[in-house]
Image: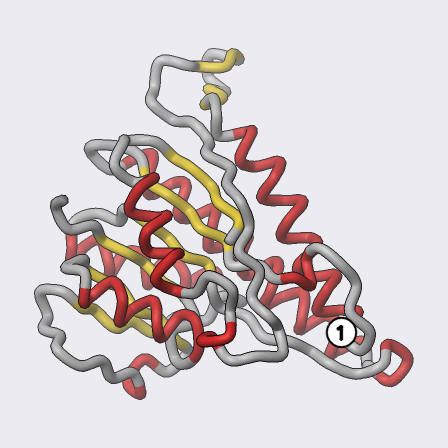
Amino acid sequence: MSPKVFFITGTSTGFGNELVKKCIASGDKVVATARSSSKLSFPDTTKDNLLTVDLDVTQEASIHKAFDTALKHFGRIDVVVNNAGYGLSGEFESLSDKQIRTQMEVNFFGLINVTRVALETMRSQKPCGGLIQQITSIGGQRGVPGFSIYCASKWAVEGYTEALSQEVSVVYDPSQRRNQTDIPFSSSPTGISRSNLLSQVDSAPTGPAAAWTLARTRSQSTIISTQRL
């Protein structure tokens, strides 16, 4: 298989960090992003297979700049992995409005903004298409005491992704006011690998290796696809 270009958010630690290593070890190319990318370090990499870029998912200008830098370096993006996020813990009544809004800004609105630019990028590149993976959690499937707002952010991601995966099965052309189906975009909803939000990445039921395999399998055809992981 020819190398694919992965654009991964939140690669400082945990799942994102391990996924970068898996992609590199498998012969793919990676755009590894973090708020302070100068702190990122991965073994056995060169400028030909790794680009580290600053990215704050809460800042739209930062998102556009990261995608532009990636495209200038590698020419295209095949897989976007929305991994950036964190878990806000504490009983609901003790949480401030600022804490709650920041959790949603990072875990949900940040993911939406990255996804929007990813879709624009994948539609415009030649050949068109690509894959978007959303990293969710068991907290997006059930309520966990002490993590009410974290769970709310992940439930939001689940609902958004389920709807979007159906929307991208066709492309709406506003100029023609019709659904245009002759462009090869479709959706590929898949099963969900649920990471234990209280554990390290190695304790996840599937982990980065399975995520890479799933992305590689789905990204062989020219489609825009969304996956919940």
Left or right, residue 29 beside residue 135: left
Q: Is residue 138 visible?
A: yes
Q: Residue furthest bottom?
A: 39
Residue where numbered disc 1 is placed? 147
Residue 166, by quadrant, is top right
Residue 21, by quadrant, is bottom left
Q: Is residue 97 above or below residue 165?
A: below
Residue 141: percent from left, percent from top: 71, 55
Left or right, residue 143 beside residue 53: right
Left or right, residue 189 beside residue 35: right
Specify the color scheme: secondary structure
Query: Residue at (70%, 69%) from the top-left corner?
Result: 150
Q: Is residue 209 above or below residue 229?
A: below
Q: Dot 1: within a 10 Å radius of its alpha carbon, few (fewer than 14), some, or many (20 or more) residues?
A: some
Residue 164: percent from left, percent from top: 56, 37
Residue 144: percent from left, percent from top: 78, 69
Q: Is residue 73 visible?
A: no
Q: Is residue 197 above or below residue 154?
A: below
Residue 143: percent from left, percent from top: 79, 63
Amino acid under label 1? Phe
Left or right, residue 155 beside residue 52: right
32 or 23: which is nearer to us?
Answer: 23
Q: Secondary structure at mark 1?
A: loop
Q: Is residue 130 above or below residue 192?
A: above
Query: Residue at (41%, 78%) from the top-left corner?
Result: 35
Residue 182, by quadrant, is top left
Query: Residue at (17%, 56%) from the top-left corner?
Result: 72
59 or 121: which is nearer to us?
Answer: 121
